[in-house]
Image (cartoon, helix red, strand yellow):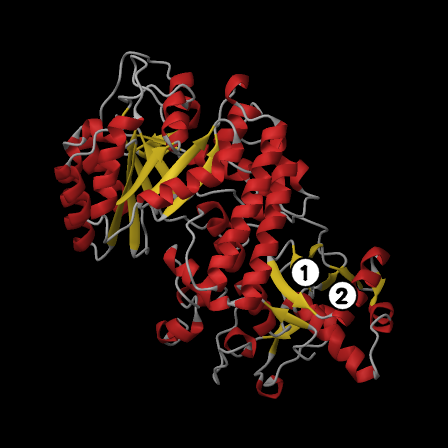
Amino acid sequence: MKKKGLKALNKRAKKLEEREVFGMEEVDVLTGQPIGCTTVFDTGWETNPRPTTPMGNCVSSARDFTSCSGPCWWPAQTPDNITNWPEFQNQCLAVERDWRNLNFVIKR
Amino acid sequence: MNKFRVAENKMIRTDGKDYIFLVADKAIFEMDTPTKTILDDLYPKGALTRQEVVAGLACESKEKQEDLFQGLLKRRVIVPANNGTSVSKKAKPYSISIPLKTLILHLTDGCNLNCRYCYHAEWDPKQGRKKVMGLDVARRAVDFLLDYAGELEEVVLVFFGGEPLLNFRVIPAVVDYACQKASEKGKKINFAITTNGTLLTDEIIDFFQDKNIGVTVSLDGFDDVHNRYRQFPDGSPSYGMMLPKIKRLLNRSDKRPAVARVTLVEDPSKVPDILDHLLGLGFVEVGFAPVTTGHPDYQLSNHDMDLLLGEFQNLSQKFLNAAKERRFYGFSNIIDMLVSLHQGEVMNYPCGAGLGLFSIGPDGQLYLCQRFTGQDEFCMGDIFNGFDQEKLETFRDQAEISNKADCRQCWARTICTGGCYHEACVREGNHLKPNLHYCEWIKQWSEIGLKTYCQLATADSEYLEMLCMSRGYRSV
């Protein structure tokens, strides 16, 4: 949509404007398919173990940081945050600022 | 089949332009006329299928309709119809500890004034036995603040009372101790004090300047208004004694300007004159609050509250006119509102009390905030043994906005969040109840705030950024 229809004024509105609608709720809402500019590079799929949508369905196991959203595009893949490292992003609250904290994931 | 609806909103029209405030997200957009027409048309229809929504979007082509739909969905102007109509109870998958940001030291129960409307006078169960905080407790409080501050880089220590200057002797020692301990921990500590101004001396004023302590003076306005309620115990007036001291304070407070807080008891038509009088004295900002009291004699009547709203509206306009010329008009009430709207942070609680803010009684007990100091029901542990976790968690669970049934359908809930706990305790009989007695008022005030915000954001959004920075928010 062109900006002329709605213009974000406060910080919250600007955040909404910048985001991409790739979150879980919108995936379901939009097309029923996982989408994203690097979908073809997704390394694999696993079953969603949580009681949330898409229940028992496949979700991408490795995705770009913050799903390639807004200004924080980063061309590398993250650990899967569904089953093995659900909290890996906690040390990286603002990816632009804190990305160095992520280091490597070493599976013991 | 998934259904969609227009998100809960408040439409604002001001200065010939249309705006939309998204209630749940606290997001504010300016709208062009076609978008407004579309939303006005869709809103009353409730839940619709995707096809029905898209068909209702007046565009030249299918692609443009689809684009418009995606854009509205992304901005959450249109939302899935099943994602809760108003307040959704947030799941708490991980327990998050809230860092301690502000501690308010209740340096003494005592006060040299005997203001007739004071909430302490109404509630103080130990009349005559005034407690004073010792240096050991104050130091321990500083340790407590720094221990519980987590990753925060900056914390705040506030000196409060009673009249904190009655116990001034501990303040320099606490400030030195706090600065030293904070720097050991790599943190910055800010200080503030609220005083009635009658005990200020040149030495105290110099000390405040030297240590960069933010001073708030609690007062009522010019002499006749002030002296009516703010008297010494023998009934003598306090304005004449306070004024020269305040003037000296304001003359010297160039590093960190002083602010005034006015308690309103009567005659709201005097508010503009009081504001100009206090700004004229040299206060950088002046905030007004109707007195909190269960005593009907001191409560503002509904008629007075209506008058007050009118005055606030005029003052907001005056602020806006000044802002458009890049001048500053220190009317705190509208500034607080504008900062809150610009930040757009969705809050589940009305304030920081019991979250990142606590007050500490003279013996080291922790209370929800300074207004509850000394009341056992609101004691949340002490600085020696730590928080009463169970009581605190219960409070946090109960105080959440989702538990306030009366607020669920209100468009202003993300601005007001039910209002002050202490006010609710006094006026509604329970601190967990929303302040229903001023609902309509707060809605109208919020609307004035939104209109002022929309105009200023359209004219000069940089000015809003500067306002937010002056309140300690960082840009971006």
Q: Is residue B111 left or right of residue A86?
A: left
**Mark 2 belongs to which amino acid?**
Lys
Q: In the picture shown, does residue B20 fall above or below B388?
A: below
CB atoms of marks 1 and 2 within 8 Å: yes
Provide residue B93's location: percent of width, then percent of height: 53, 53
**Secondary structure beneath label 1:** strand
Asked if one can make out residue A49 in the rendered structure from this viewpoint, the answer is no
Residue that mark 1 sits on: B20
Provide residue B461's location: percent of width, then percent of height: 50, 67
Image quadrant occupied by the N terminus of chain A:
bottom right
Q: Residue at x 50, y 21 (%)?
A: B298
Q: In the picture shown, does residue A28 fall above or below B447?
A: below
Q: CA distance from mark 1 to mark 2?
A: 9 Å
**Secondary structure beneath label 2:** helix
Residue that mark 2 sits on: B36
User: Residue B113 sits in which quadrant?
Assistant: top left
Task: Please state which of residues B370 and B95 is positioned toward the viewer in this rendering.
Answer: B370
